[in-house]
Every structure is written in structure tokens, then in C-alpha cells.
């Protein structure tokens, strides 16, 4: 056994390599640490400009290390560093204000337009339940107890017409109590709305139930007041906030249906892909609805308790209805068209890339870089 | 020391949990999915933080307005709602997929396909907590409020419900909770790894350890034939052994066992005084040998490879 010695570590390429590049890695690590600690926007312009360079250099170090070095600690370190840098470099860097304006001026109305069939279904369930409950309760007031229960304080068929009327025109002074009332209404309704969306994951049956139940209560309520000749007063009481609130609940139900649809009938895609796409758009709808419920809570808790004039109540109701029709129907239309053009172009690129990927995996990587 | 326990020394994660993302530059990055315990830990930390925030703000507000007025209640109701539903979303959007709890534990939410983590995805995965956590919790803790006179079976059902959704991540291979499925996200481990010194460099430095009364040995040398026995896997297991708890009694024990095993395997007949030194020299020589081979396109994966 002859001793052909290999003990000169300084000649090892992996050792040399590490010595040459270590400073770059350290610089990247420091930059990421700063960004993590104080946020990306605290980095100076010069640091921001260096970030992608350092990231690419380290990324290339990683691929070199993978091919020439057997030092596990080193590749592990580089892999971790590049992974952390990846999210900083490719993370969202949009300003919050910009994101919000894009959300409200385009994303939300556009997503709602795209979900019109689910919204229609959700509205039909609510209205059908309301009509059914109205008919049943109209014929036999005992149904009221079955649909509404004993929760509606002092508003049951046992109450006198005068009591019912008082309930509609009841006002409260001292804004503190009203604020609490509005806040709890908002948080309660929003929770129900979010739940209607989330239970879409259980094939949408609870969503259906929630919408149906909501409709039943509405119908039974209407039947009670109509039977006492208080129809106009009831709607004047309900619609100022009800237009917004009922729309929001219907939208949340639609979001739940969308989720259930994606889960149960994924179509040509895998269930996961289908969920991923519709789950995101459903979440957008729900966030919009929570905003609407906040607005509705303010009207219900504050405006309705202080203003009793029927014409004013109806004017407010009409105005909110007109506003929502305008907002969901027309805001962001031009951006929709622009987006459709972009998406078609993107799908064409994706199609070509798919074809290329069949020919050569490497080429598709290059297209990605070129984009 | 048998091979199984050697493998345990390797700082490798369960390979079933590793997911690959190809960067736009075309280089694959590997991420390890977060373990259930880590995620639960991060969740608990975040919850504690939320409770602290609510308590502190309520206290400060009530002091400021003199403990009077229901405006205060209104503010607290809304604050609680916003915290419960938007705490996670807020941080995950602003901190690139982390929250204070996640950061402490070292985990992060990423897009399953490696793209940008969209705001709508973050919202979707967190709104679902209403179904996964809050509603079952409300049923369990305060079922009288949600549903007066709830029968026992209903409470049982709520418990089962909570159980199914809470433990969802354990039942699927990607460790997804319902929110992750809907949003197309994954939660991965991302601890901070520090760059430790190269063992080869260290081996070249000062003598490390010698039993009392003996001089530190000169560098050990190996023949090509001796270096041709082991492969990359064994090299990296050895790296793990050398790096695990240096200075500890268990470390010396492991070193001695491994050194004996190696000497036997490569038929190293000369006397070895300092096992640590021997293994470090062997590591350096073996790595130089294998890396040299790699330059010529031969990757010898392990000792069974031809």
C-alpha cells in the first residue's frame, strides 16, 4: 500500500471557492437581517440596488457549491440563505396605499362581477326562503315562532300593533350606547358572513342553511308587520341598512358557494388547483362584504336609531342601492378589459413554454428568465 | 455504532417533507415543510400576543377616558374582531409570510408554486380560521351562548369538528390545513443557519486533542485505495459526527467508535494516537478525493456505488 498523499487542503477547489465568495454571502445575510428586522422600506436606495446583485451572486454560488463542494454545512447554509433572500427579493413591495386603491378600484368589483352566477344562486336561495316564510307565516302566525324563535325582543305576534310600531321608531339618545350596539352588530354579522364563506369547504351545505335561515327570518318578520298594516314602516326601518347588509350576506354566501363549487366540481383541473383559484377570489369577496357590513352596522346602529322620517329613510335606502349597483357594476371595467388582454398574452406564452418544455426542459427555464 | 444511529447524526430532514421550488433563474431551491409542533407553537405565541394587545389597549383606553362610557366598549368590540380576523393576515402580508410567532419559531408561509405570496391568498388562508378554530372553540367553551340548551351530542359534534380541522395538517402529505388548501400555500421551516468554519480548514490548523503525555500526531495520510472505499453519504455522516457536540464526552465516545470502524474498513494498520485528528485528516483527504472525482463527473454516492 503506497502512500499517495492528498493532504494539502489549500489546493481544494471548494475551500478556495468559499474563501473567494464568503464576503458576498455575508453582505447578503446582513442586508436580509436588516430587512427582516426593520422592514424592506428602511433599506436605502443603494442597499436596495445591491440586493438583487448579491442575491444572484449567492444563487450562483449555491449552484456552484452543489456541483463542486461536498461540505454539507456549506451547501445547507447557502440553501438557507438563498431561500430567505428569495422571499425578500420576490416579495410584494407595493405600498399599502397602492394595494388598497387597487383592491377597491378594481379587484373587488371585478371579482364580484366574475362571481355573478354564484351571487344569483345565493340571492335566489335567500329570496325563495323569504317568500316561503312570508306565505306560511301570513297564513298561520304560529310559524313565526318556528322561524324567528323568541330572540326578537318584544316583536312577536303576541305584541300589540302599537308596540310593534314603537319598535320601528324607537330612538335612543346618548351616542355611547348606539356605538356599542353598532359595533356588536358589525362584529356579529361579519362573523356569520365569514362563517358562510368558510363552511363552503364542507361542500357548502352549512352555507346553504345559513342563507336559507336568514331568508326565513326576513320573510316571517315581513309577514308579521304586513299583517298589522305596518308594511311601509317596516321597509323604511329595514332597508337603509338592509340593502347593504343583505347584499353583504348574499355575497358571503356566494363566496361559500364558489368554494363548494371548486371543491365538488373542479372540472378539468385538479381539485387543489381549482380550490386555490376560487378560494382566493372568494376571500376577496368576503373582505369586501366585511367592509359593507361595517358600513351597514353604522347605518343600523346610529342613523336608524336617530332618524325616523319615512321619506328620509327611503332616500337613504335608495341611495345605498344605487351606489352598490354603480360600484359593483361599473367601477374598474376598463381595467377588466386591459387585464383580459394581458391574460390572453400570458396564456399564449404559457402555451408556448409548455410546448418548449416538451422539447427541452432547459429552454423553458430560459424563457422564464427572459420574461 | 451501527449505520442506523449514524444516519441519525446526519442533520438531514425527513426527505418526505422536502419540497422544491424552481426560481425564475432556473435553480431549484429546497424547502422543508414545517412540523405540526412548530406550527402549533407559533399559533400559541401569536394568540398570546393578541390577548396581551387586547388587554393592554383596553386597560390604557379605560384609564384614558376614566373607565366610563360605552364608546370604549364599542372600540374594544371592534378591536377584538379585527385582531381575531386580521392579525395573521396583516403580518403575513407585511412581513412576507411571517408573523411574530412564526418568526420566533422560524417558519414561513410561501406560495405553493414559489410565486409571490398574494394578498388574496393570505386573506383566504386566514379567514378560514373562523371555521377551523373560532367556531369550534366557541362551541366548546361557551355553547350556552351560541346555541342555548345545546344537547350533549351537539357539543360532542363540535368537538369532533374541531378535531378534524385542527389535525388536518397531520393527515395529508403536504401538511396543509384547510386554509392552505384554499389559498394554495405551504408553511415551511426557515430557521437562520449560520456559516460554520470548514472542517478542512480546521484540520489544517493547530493540533486538537492528544491524550495526556503524548505528542499530537503528525498529519495522517491515506492511499488512493483507502480513499476509494467510502462515498459521499459516508463523508457527510462523518461531517455530522465531527460537528456534533464538540468537547462533550459523548462526542469523544462517538469519535472513538467511528474511528475504529473506519480504520477497520479501510485497513489502516499504523497506530492512531489521536482519533479526532485521525478522523479530521481522513475527512479532509476523503473530501479532496471525492471532490476531485466530481470534477471529472463521477459522483460516488455511497460505499455501495460502483
Image: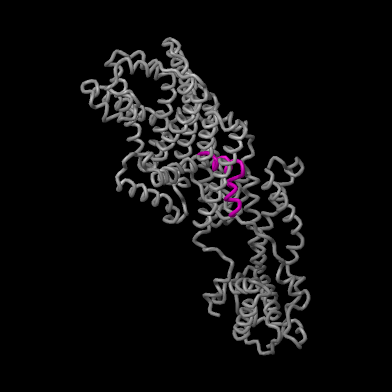
Residue B118 pos. (x, y %): 55, 40
Predominant secondary structure, magenta span: helix
- The residue at the point 51 percent across, 21 percent down is A174
Count how many numbered circles sit on residues in the image.
0
- The residue at the point 73 percent across, 63 percent down is A18
Give the image quarter of residue B65: top right
Q: Is residue A162 above or below residue A297?
A: above
Residues B96 and B146: in front is B146
Q: In the image, is B223 to the left or to the right of A236? A: right
Where the N terminus of chain A falls, by quadrant?
bottom right
Residue B81 pos. (x, y %): 50, 36
Range of residues picked out in magenta: B85-105
Residue A24 visible to the viewer = yes
Residue B258 pos. (x, y %): 61, 80
Give the image quarter of residue A116: top left
Where the C terminus of chain A falls, by quadrant?
top right
Q: Is residue B36 above or below residue B46?
A: below
Q: In the image, is B203 to the left or to the right of A233? A: right
Was residue B181 drawn as part of the magenta stretch in this picture?
A: no
Q: Is residue A76 above or below residue A256?
A: below
Was residue B95 drawn as part of the magenta stretch in this picture?
A: yes
Give the image quarter of residue A61: bottom right
Q: Which residue lies furthest to the left in this view?
A: A139
Q: Is residue A268 above or below residue A309?
A: below
Amino acid at each position: 500500500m503506497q502512500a499517495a498523499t492528498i493532504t494539502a487542503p489549500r489546493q481544494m477547489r471548494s475551500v478556495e471557492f468559499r474563501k473567494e465568495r464568503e464576503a458576498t454571502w455575508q453582505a447578503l445575510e446582513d442586508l436580509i437581517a436588516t430587512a427582516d428586522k426593520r422592514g424592506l422600506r428602511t433599506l436605502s436606495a443603494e442597499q436596495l440596488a445591491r440586493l438583487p446583485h448579491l442575491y444572484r451572486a449567492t444563487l450562483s454560488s449555491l449552484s456552484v457549491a452543489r456541483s463542486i463542494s461536498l461540505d454539507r454545512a456549506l451547501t445547507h447554509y447557502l440553501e438557507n440563505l438563498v431561500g430567505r433572500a428569495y422571499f425578500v427579493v420576490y416579495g410584494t413591495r407595493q405600498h399599502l396605499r397602492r394595494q388598497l386603491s387597487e383592491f377597491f378600484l378594481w379587484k373587488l368589483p371585478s371579482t364580484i362581477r366574475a362571481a355573478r352566477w354564484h351571487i344569483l344562486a345565493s340571492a335566489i336561495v335567500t329570496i325563495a326562503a323569504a317568500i316561503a316564510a312570508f306565505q306560511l307565516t301570513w297564513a298561520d302566525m304560529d310559524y313565526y315562532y318556528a322561524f324567528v324563535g323568541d330572540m326578537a325582543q318584544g316583536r312577536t305576534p303576541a305584541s300589540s300593533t302599537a308596540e310593534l310600531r314603537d319598535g320601528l321608531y324607537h330612538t335612543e339618545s346618548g351616542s355611547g350606547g348606539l356605538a356599542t350596539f353598532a359595533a356588536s352588530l358589525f362584529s356579529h354579522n361579519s362573523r356569520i358572513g365569514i362563517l358562510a364563506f368558510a363552511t363552503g369547504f364542507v361542500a357548502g351545505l352549512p352555507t346553504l342553511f345559513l342563507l336559507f335561515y336568514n331568508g326565513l327570518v326576513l320573510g316571517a318578520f315581513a309577514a308579521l308587520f304586513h299583517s298589522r298594516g305596518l308594511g311601509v314602516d317596516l321597509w323604511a326601518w329595514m332597508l337603509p341598512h338592509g340593502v347593504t347588509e343583505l347584499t353583504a350576506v348574499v355575497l358571503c354566501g356566494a363566496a361559500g358557494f364558489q368554494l363548494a363549487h371548486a371543491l365538488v366540481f373542479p372540472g378539468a383541473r385538479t381539485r387543489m388547483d381549482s380550490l386555490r383559484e376560487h378560494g382566493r377570489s372568494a376571500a376577496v369577496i368576503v373582505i369586501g362584504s366585511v367592509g359593507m357590513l361595517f358600513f351597514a352596522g353604522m347605518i343600523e346602529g346610529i342613523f336608524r336609531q336617530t332618524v325616523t322620517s319615512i321619506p328620509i329613510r327611503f332616500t337613504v335606502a335608495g341611495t345605498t342601492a344605487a351606489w352598490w349597483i354603480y360600484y359593483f357594476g361599473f367601477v374598474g371595467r376598463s381595467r377588466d378589459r386591459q387585464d383580459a388582454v394581458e391574460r390572453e398574452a400570458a396564456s399564449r406564452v404559457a402555451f408556448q413554454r409548455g410546448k418548449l418544455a416538451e422539447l427541452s426542459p432547459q429552454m423553458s427555464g430560459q424563457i422564464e428568465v427572459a420574461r | 455504532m451501527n449505520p442506523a444511529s449514524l444516519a441519525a447524526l446526519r442533520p438531514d430532514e425527513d426527505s418526505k417533507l422536502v419540497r422544491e421550488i424552481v426560481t425564475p433563474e432556473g435553480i431549484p431551491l429546497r424547502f422543508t415543510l414545517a412540523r405540526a409542533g412548530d406550527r402549533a407553537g407559533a399559533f400559541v405565541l401569536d394568540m398570546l400576543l393578541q390577548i396581551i394587545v387586547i388587554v393592554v389597549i383596553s386597560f390604557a383606553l379605560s384609564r384614558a377616558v376614566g373607565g366610563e362610557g360605552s364608546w370604549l366598549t364599542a372600540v374594544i368590540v371592534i378591536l377584538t374582531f379585527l385582531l381575531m380576523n386580521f392579525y395573521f393576515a396583516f403580518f403575513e402580508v407585511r412581513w412576507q409570510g411571517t408573523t411574530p410567532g412564526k418568526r420566533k419559531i422560524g417558519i414561513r408561509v410561501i406560495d405553493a408554486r414559489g410565486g409571490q405570496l398574494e394578498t388574496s391568498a393570505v386573506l383566504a388562508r386566514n379567514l378560514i380560521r373562523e371555521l377551523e378554530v373560532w367556531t369550534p372553540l366557541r362551541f366548546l367553551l361557551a355553547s350556552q351562548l351560541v346555541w342555548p340548551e345545546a344537547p350533549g351530542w351537539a357539543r360532542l359534534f363540535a368537538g369532533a369538528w374541531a378535531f378534524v380541522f385542527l389535525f388536518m395538517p397531520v393527515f395529508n402529505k403536504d401538511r396543509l390545513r384547510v386554509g392552505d388548501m384554499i389559498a394554495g400555500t405551504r408553511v415551511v421551516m426557515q430557521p437562520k443557519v449560520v456559516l460554520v468554519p470548514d472542517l478542512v480548514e480546521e484540520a489544517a490548523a493547530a493540533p486538537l486533542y492528544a491524550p495526556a503525555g503524548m505528542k499530537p500526531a503528525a498529519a495522517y495520510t491515506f492511499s488512493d485505495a483507502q480513499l476509494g472505499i467510502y462515498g459521499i453519504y459516508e463523508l457527510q455522516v462523518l461531517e455530522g459526527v465531527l460537528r456534533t457536540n464538540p468537547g462533550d464526552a459523548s462526542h469523544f465516545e462517538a469519535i472513538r467508535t467511528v474511528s475504529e470502524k473506519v480504520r477497520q474498513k479501510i485497513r489502516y494498520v499504523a497506530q492512531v494516537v489521536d482519533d479526532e485528528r485521525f478522523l479530521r485528516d481522513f475527512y479532509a483527504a476523503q473530501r479532496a478525493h471525492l471532490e476531485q472525482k466530481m470534477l471529472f463527473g463521477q459522483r460516488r454516492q455511497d460505499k455501495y456505488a460502483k
